[in-house]
Image: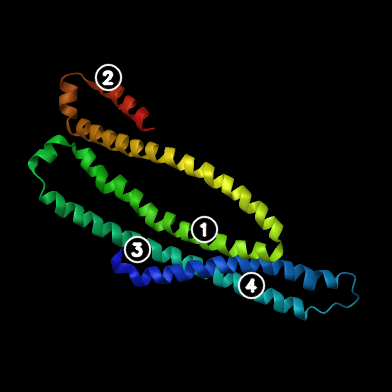
């Protein structure tokens, strides 16, 4: 991702704008209701000029936030696709120098899984998870300062609850990581088995091995699922 330093800076700025716009729009709704809508209730001839200006302002804030979100999502997709291409090219070059023993001890499906499933998981992490993580951090910071502005005591209560949630999430994440690795390993094993059975289907039919092959496929599929 070193080739995308400038794009990453742009993405960070857009994420910051999106987070600030989201927090600012929420704060502005309070001012819109208390400062413009409520005073006009019961007024014989209300003046809508201030309300219209406020609506235009909040509309501009929403527009900036939406454009920033669209831009950083689009740029992250470009970064993810470019990074994946480079990784696959490097993997292919690396495999050109591997000994024959490696290919004898790994099924074709297992090797294919490295180029498809594993790299696609990496693509999802770069295109979605990274942007969401940074966006969540900026949004949390913006919301935190807004909460401090509104009520300090409410902020302390929320922080205490968030601390308990973080402890729970940390323990849960440790367990999920192990299951995820096991799932990826089982998926590579399943791909290797399917590839072998498809390429060797004539041999399977000659020896009437269809039933055993289906049973083994169901077993490996259950392990993966």
Q: Secondary structure at mark 2?
A: helix
Residue 25 numbered tag: none
Q: Sort mark 3 into few (<14), some (14-19) or many (20+) by Cα contacts within 10 Å.
A: many
Residue 171 position within the rendered picture, expressed as x and y whole percent measured from the top left = 48, 40
- Sequence-earlier tag: 4 or 1: 4
- Sequence-earlier tag: 2 or 3: 3
Marks 3 and 2: in contact by CB < 8 Å?
no
Say if 37 sits above or below 172 in the image: below
Q: Residue at x 31, y 28 (%)?
A: 220
Q: Secondary structure at mark 1?
A: helix
According to the image, label 2 marks what residue? Answer: 211
Residue 142 position within the rendered picture, expressed as x and y whole percent measured from the top left = 58, 65
Query: How far apart, in angstroms, are the residues tagged by discs 2 and 3?
Result: 46 Å
Most extreme residue toward the left is 100
Q: Secondary structure at mark 3?
A: helix
Marks 1 and 2: in contact by CB < 8 Å?
no
- Sequence-earlier tag: 1 or 3: 3
Residue 59 numbered tag: 4
Q: Quadrant of the C terminus?
A: top left
According to the image, label 1 marks what residue? Answer: 136
Q: Sort mark 2 into few (<14), some (14-19) or many (20+) by Cα contacts within 10 Å.
A: few
Q: Is residue 3 visible?
A: yes
Q: Is residue 66 visible?
A: no
According to the image, label 3 marks what residue? Answer: 79
Query: How far apart, in angstroms, are the residues tagged by discs 2 and 1?
Result: 50 Å
Query: How far apart, in angstroms, are the residues tagged by discs 1 and 3?
Result: 20 Å
Q: Sort mark 1 into few (<14), some (14-19) or many (20+) by Cα contacts within 10 Å.
A: some
Say if 210 sits above or below 173 in the image: above
Query: How far apart, in angstroms, are the residues tagged by discs 4 and 1?
Result: 23 Å
Q: Residue at x 66, y 62 (%)?
A: 147
Q: Quadrant of the N terminus?
A: bottom left
Q: Secondary structure at mark 4?
A: helix
């Amino acid at each position: 991702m070193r080739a995308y330093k400038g794009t990453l800076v742009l993405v960070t700025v857009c994420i910051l704008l999106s987070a600030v716009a989201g927090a600012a729009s929420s704060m502005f709704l309070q001012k819109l209701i208390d400062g413009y809508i409520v005073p006009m209730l019961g007024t014989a001839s209300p003046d809508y000029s201030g309300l219209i200006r406020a609506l235009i302002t909040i509309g501009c804030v929403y527009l900036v936030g939406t454009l920033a979100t669209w831009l950083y999502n689009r740029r992250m997709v470009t970064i993810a696709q470019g990074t994946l291409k480079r990784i696959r090219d490097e993997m292919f070059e690396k495999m050109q120098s591997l000994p024959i023993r490696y290919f004898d001890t790994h099924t074709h499906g297992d090797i294919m899984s490295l180029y498809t499933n594993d790299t696609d998981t990496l693509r999802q992490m770069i295109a979605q998870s990274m942007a969401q993580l940074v966006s969540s951090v900026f949004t949390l910071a913006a919301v935190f300062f807004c909460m401090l502005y509104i009520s300090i005591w409410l902020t302390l209560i929320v922080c205490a609850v968030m601390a308990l949630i973080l402890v729970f999430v940390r323990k849960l994440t440790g367990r999920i990581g192990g299951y995820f690795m096991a799932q990826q390993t089982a998926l590579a094993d399943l791909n290797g088995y399917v590839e072998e059975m498809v390429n060797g289907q004539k041999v399977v039919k000659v020896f009437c091995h269809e039933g055993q092959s289906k049973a083994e496929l169901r077993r490996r599929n259950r392990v993966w699922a």
